[in-house]
Amino acid sequence: MSFQPLDPNPTVRFSHGVTYLTPEPVIEVEIAATDALGVLLGTPQRTSVLVDSGADYTILDDRIAPILGIDLDRCRPATVIAVGGGSIPGKAAPLWIGLCGIWVHAVTIFQERPTPQLLGREGVFDQLAITFVQGESRLLAAVA
Amino acid sequence: MESLLLRTPSEPIPEKGPVVKLATVNARIAAAGATSPHFQTPSGTVDAAPAQSPSDRSSSIAKWLASDVARRFDGRWVLLNDVYEAVDHDTSASELQRRHSGLVDPLIVFVQPPRVRFG
């Protein structure tokens, strides 16, 4: 297994601490939705997400969903439990996420104005081994 | 003597060309005028690629995705034409869609690679 830089030219420095304060491990990913067969639905987008190994799921702004061709009214409701307690409602939908040269299929939660958007473990960490090199302010990832 | 050279001998003949409605061809011929006294404009209007029902379309896409040809595009986004041939491909869905933004309803599919597992 050889690790490759997840973001070869990181513009955002980060530290890996107990809490995510700026600077943060933010990367740009490409996202796209397909039907069950694999046919592209809407318009793929590029967006920034905070890599969060503590998050179960990827969480994105629900304003992106219709652009991707996802009808949130037909998606199942999902509730995200925040770290500090409380719950935030959202809608869950499968999504393709492109990063580190591959596309991973991940259940994604769409919420109103999440701050920040998160790249969670489901789907993503199944196919990528991601490590935080705190001393060098870099993210590294290995594809099996 | 009138000579009508359609194609130079060295020019390869493509296996498939663009899909053009016969009506469009007729209109272009009519606009250009007759090129030969022996030439007659074809009559009738047919689609070179007749429309498929949604189920037939899904079946055709599934068949293509299961083909050996599709395996060459594992992990890539592929633009298919009306007869389910790969026209273009890219690792970026955005880039592929942008390149073909002029198409009304481009058929772009993702060729899912075999499930990746850590060894």
Image (spheres, coloured by chain):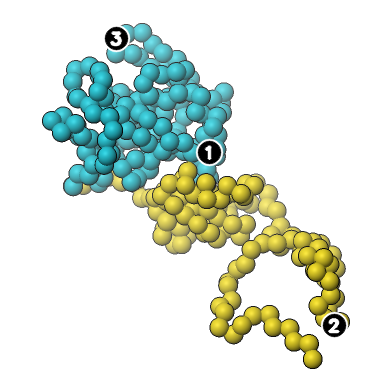
Chain colours: A cyan, B yellow
Badge 1 or badge 3: first in the primary sequence: 1
Placement of B15 over or under A80, stated as above or below = below
| Element type at mark 3 | loop
Residue type marked 1 = Thr
Horizontal and vertical percent for residue B8?
A: 61, 82
| Residue lying at 47% horizontally and 55% vertically, measured from the top left | B89
The residue indicated by pointer 1 is A43
| Residue lying at 19% horizontally and 25% vertically, measured from the top left | A15
User: Is the residue at mark 2 from the same chain as the one at mark 3?
Assistant: no
| Element type at mark 2 | loop
Q: Quadrant of the N terminus of chain B?
A: bottom right
Q: Report the disc number at residue A84.
A: 3
Q: Which of the 4 quarters of the picture holds residue A53? A: top left
Q: Is residue A16 left or right of residue A93?
A: left
| Residue lying at 61% horizontally and 49% vertically, measured from the top left | B102
Residue type marked 2 = His
Residue B54 at least partly seen: yes
Q: How many marks on residues?
A: 3
Residue type marked 3 = Gly
The residue indicated by pointer 2 is B38
- Spatial CA distance of label 1 from label 3 is 35 Å
Mark 2 surroundings: few (<14), some (14-19) or many (≥20) residues within 10 A? few
- Spatial CA distance of label 2 from label 3 is 84 Å
